[in-house]
Amino acid sequence: MEKLKNNKVLQKIKSIFDKIWTYDILHPFCYAILVTMIVECFNRRNLTGITFLFTHPVIFLANMLIVTSCLSIGMLFKKRTFIYTLISIIWIGLSITNFVIKSVRKTPFTAMDFLVLDDARKVAPMYLTVINMIFIVLAIVLVIVALVFLYRKTGKIKTELSLKRFIILGAGQSLIVILFTYGIITTLLLNKIIAADFGNLSNAFQNYGFVYCFTTSVVDRGVHKDSDYSEEYVDSIKETIDSVETTTEEDEPNIIFLQLESFFDPTEIKGLELSSEALPTFNKLQQEYTSGYLSVPVFGAGTVNTEFEVQTGMNLDDFGPGEYPYKTALQNKVCESSAYVLKDLGYSAHVIHNNTATFYTRNKVFSRLGYDTFTPVEYMDGISKTPNGNWAKDEILTKYIKKALDSTTGPDYIYTISVEGHGDYPNEYPEGYTPEITIKNFPDADNTVAFEYYVNMAHDMDKFIAQLIDELSNYDEKTVLVMYGDHLPTFNLKDEDMKHNSIYETEYVMWSNFDMDKENVNLEAYQLTSYVFSRLNISQGNIFKYHQLSKDSEDYLKDLKILEYDILYGNQDIYNGESPYKQTDLKLGLDDITITNAYEYEGDLFVEGSYFNDYSTVLVNSKKYSTQKINDRLLKVEGASIKDGDIISVAQIDKDGVELSRVIYLVSSNVKESAKDEKMFRLVA
């Protein structure tokens, strides 16, 4: 040891290192190397993140420089150790969140997920146990406590500079790091070493690293403005679209789209064996009616993005990484859609969904997509649940599809979203449940029971399809039913596991109760509606007509992106400067909930009316009461009383306490005696 101390060479090296280390600007670079390695270990779900520096040095450099830029903010503060630690914990925390989320939905965590935190909270109990959630909360609390302790214990940088000069110097150093990072990232993008447009999000996170991809999701939103975008360019596209005369059939059929949650044919998995056929009805329809593979924008989750593509004809690849247009663009903008287009032809437009109205803010978004009515689960009665009790079965949808068809005298467009096939899928069967179908040779062996449960849910959905087809076959109006899966379920499936070599493909069938030629056509989700329209001789709507006319053109995707930008973010030149579409006054539920009477009986309050269900809640003078549904015409509130002048309401309130609608009536002074001398209070509107 003494020899080492006296070794002049080592002492010289140490002296040089000490001098270098005195340059504060180097500290963030050094810390960033360690942070990036840890982050990539979580991103790759193994320790290969440690070797990421050596196996992918250029990509590692891009990620490390982004972390360095964030850490360089610490140079503006005297408590630099604390700031460096705080920023490092944020990046590591984001990567851990990504690790957890990919365990349940198979798509990476992006900045857009912060916009759907409320929706994530609703489904978290279905994927995480109480112990899991307690552990997560405790971990967060411990990190906060540790940070508070660190803040108190860490010292400040000693400097003779005034505070003003210290901040200016730190800001200058941070700016140098940020500009250097920007230059390197731009160079890598220009040389196509890294990409800004991802396509397959999961692959992008593996290829380009978590830090780069997550940062891209922060700064990259919406549709980018193409360099060719101009009024003249859009006019040239419009000229092409308008060159084809708008046509429709005189006898327009009802058009029903049925988006089936996590639905696909399990036999598409190589080597999988089933004890009996899972989808006999759907498979038979595929053989007899127009069908094919449908390329969808998501895997394992993200239902609303498939919805968005189908309804608007827009390509999600043109939006930011992991973006949900329902939570961004459609929060304050009206968008051309299938509903608006068909309403111009005299259709009524309905949405039916056997899940909560507020999930992905559908109760707001559907008014910006042109629908007249929206019937979510809060306006349904007679629902049965899946064996694990998490979701409504799809069989209820037949009743409300039929009700929507009967609600008008003209043609109806009905967009239906099912939920029965939704995860999480249990690895142990619920008590008393026996699967009808068993499986063998599932690639993800640890989840065999879970996938077997899913197969049986898909089989039950197939029975619902048979029920719906039988109902529509006997309907006295021409009707088209388009069925498709929104994405594959949340299992560890890879492209190579699938017979068609893609985990981003489901299947569709176009059924009708009148004669139509069968075609076998594979489509993108954003092409599905335009294809259906073309089969029905409907040439309407700019986006849909564009697909029909230009899908084989050289600039097809480029011009589609320009149209998307113009409609949602640009000058709306396609409409000559002003969109013809206006937000609708969306009605929740097809039926009018009413109150016809209220009375006290044996110390309890009873409210009579129509179309009550399990989500109906009685309020007296705005005070909410626990409500029991006796039937769809009678509600009971134990221990409540009313008097002359009270206001009684029945509100539809979801399981999170969100009030969706309310009917209000006033207690009159017209008091009558019942047969048992109990007071009854008549209600007047």
Image (cartoon, rainbow, N blue to C red):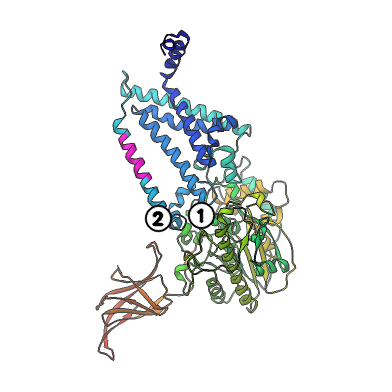
Discs 2, 1 touching: Cβ within 8 Å: no
* Residue ID at (56%, 66%): 416
| Amino acid type, label 2 | Val
**Rendering coords of residue 51 (x, y %):** 55, 32
Q: Closest to the observer: 566 or 465?
A: 465
Q: Which residue is mark 1?
A: 326
Position of the N terminus, as image quadrant, is top left
> 670 or 491, which is in the foreground?
491
SS type, badge 1: loop
Q: Quadrant of the C terminus?
A: bottom left
In reply to whether residue 595 is colored magenta, the answer given is no
Disc 2 designates what residue? 130
Q: Residue at x 40, y 48 (%)?
A: 136
Query: Residue drawn 68% across and 56% down?
Result: 271
Magenta-colored segment: predominant secondary structure: helix
Callout 2 secondary element: helix
Residue 160 in picture, x, y percent from top left: 31, 18
Q: What is the span of residues highlighted in magenta in the rendered image?
A: 139-149
Mark number for residue 661?
none
In this view, 496 is above or below 448: above
Is 145 magenta? The answer is: yes
Is any atom of residue 54 visible in this view? yes
Residue 507 visible in image? no
